[in-house]
Amino acid sequence: MDRRVAAALVLARSAQCQHWARSRPYLVEHIGMKRIAVIGAGIGGIALASNHDVVVFEKGRGVGGRMASRYAHAFSFDHGAQYFTVRDPAFAALLAPALAAGAVAPWTGSIARIADGIMTDLAEPRDRHLVGVPNMNSAVKALADGLDVRLGVEIAPLRGHTRQGRHLTSTDGVDHGLFDWVVSTTTAHQTMALFANNAPNEGALCATKMAPCYALMLGFAEPIELPWIAARVSGSPIDWIGINSTKPGRDTSCTTLVIHSTSHWAQARLGQDIELLGVELAQALHQATGIDPDLAVFRAIHRWASARRLPQPNSRPYIDPLRQLAATGDWTSGSRVEDTVLSALDLADSIERE
């Protein structure tokens, strides 16, 4: 069996394993189980958990990372990752329980291609598009069920490592215990700040380059009838338009749109007034589709500073066996959710062998 598939299957049993370890702390050191701190509760951080004694620390209020969902009034928006596909058996094994439980389901319908305001193509996607139900972060919540995930905890820059391990302290001064390994699944920039002087200031941590993206969210009180569930756009500041309300488990009595800008457009406008950028994207939506953004009863915009990985050679998970530090994330893999998961499973495999 492929080691990544085995790791994914182990994750499905990890809740029982972690309960066993936490109930018998006096045995963990004796039998050599690694006590691991994972920083970040996105899909990569949750996927990295295995039958080690793992604690996941997340500074935010919930799990999900870029598989994020935002709620406002009667509307909900998946304003980060829009969907994901499954091609690798390891990712399929990891997702199987969530699919069976209904926390993940296919998003079906046609995808349009729009160039300079003209629809040039309308077709079903080649790969099955999957989403969390009832929101994108529901997929990560399902995978995290039973794991030791501590929300609202921001870990301070790391101190030195001793033979006994490394103490983790949060920014509010609370000591969270001793760990053998610390694994960051946040952005490369945040990982560098976390590792501080404990990791060499070189390699993938420094070389990584990510591009930004702006996400405009529009909520309409009435349904909008369109022949597509999403559109890829060219000749516009817009890269993607998703009709969020067409996803399974969403409220179909209204219409919710998520509009992602191109990376080039976003990079050129960093530091500008974000609300004015929202107006520009709304105007671009009207030009591309004819949808009147002024009919929206809710509007919000979010900036993803590290949304897309730029092409770069030799990008891979970071691991330092001497200091027992490791890191993985979007910046060590491709831009797909599956790439992030497989990178995390590979890193978990490497730590297991140390």
Image: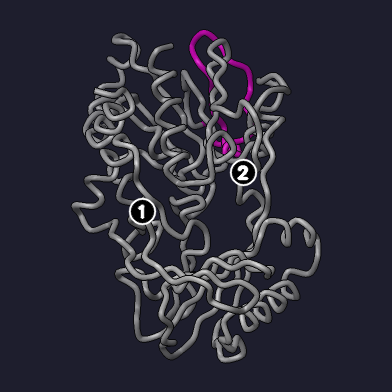
The image position of residue 254, as x and y in percent, is 41, 85
Residue 64 is a magenta residue: no
Residue 76 sits in quarter: bottom left
Count residues near mark 1 (Cα–Cα under 10 Å), then give few for <14, some for 14-19, many for 20+.
few
Q: Is residue 140 left or right of residue 72?
A: left
Count residues near mark 2 (Cα–Cα under 10 Å), then give few for <14, some for 14-19, many for 20+.
some
- SS assignment for the magenta stretch, majority: loop
Tell me the kind of residue under disc 2.
Arg
On residue 309, the disc is 2
How many labels sit on residues?
A: 2
The image position of residue 180, as x and y in percent, is 46, 18
Residue of label 1: 127
Give the residue displayed 26% in from the left and 29% down from the top: 10
Residue 166 is a magenta residue: yes
Q: Is residue 4 left or right of residue 81?
A: left
The image position of residue 225, as x and y in percent, is 41, 87
Please give the range of residues in magenta: 155-175
Which color scheme is applied? one colour
Say if mark 1 contacts mark 2, CB within 8 Å. Answer: no
Q: Which is more toward the observer, 264 or 139?
A: 264
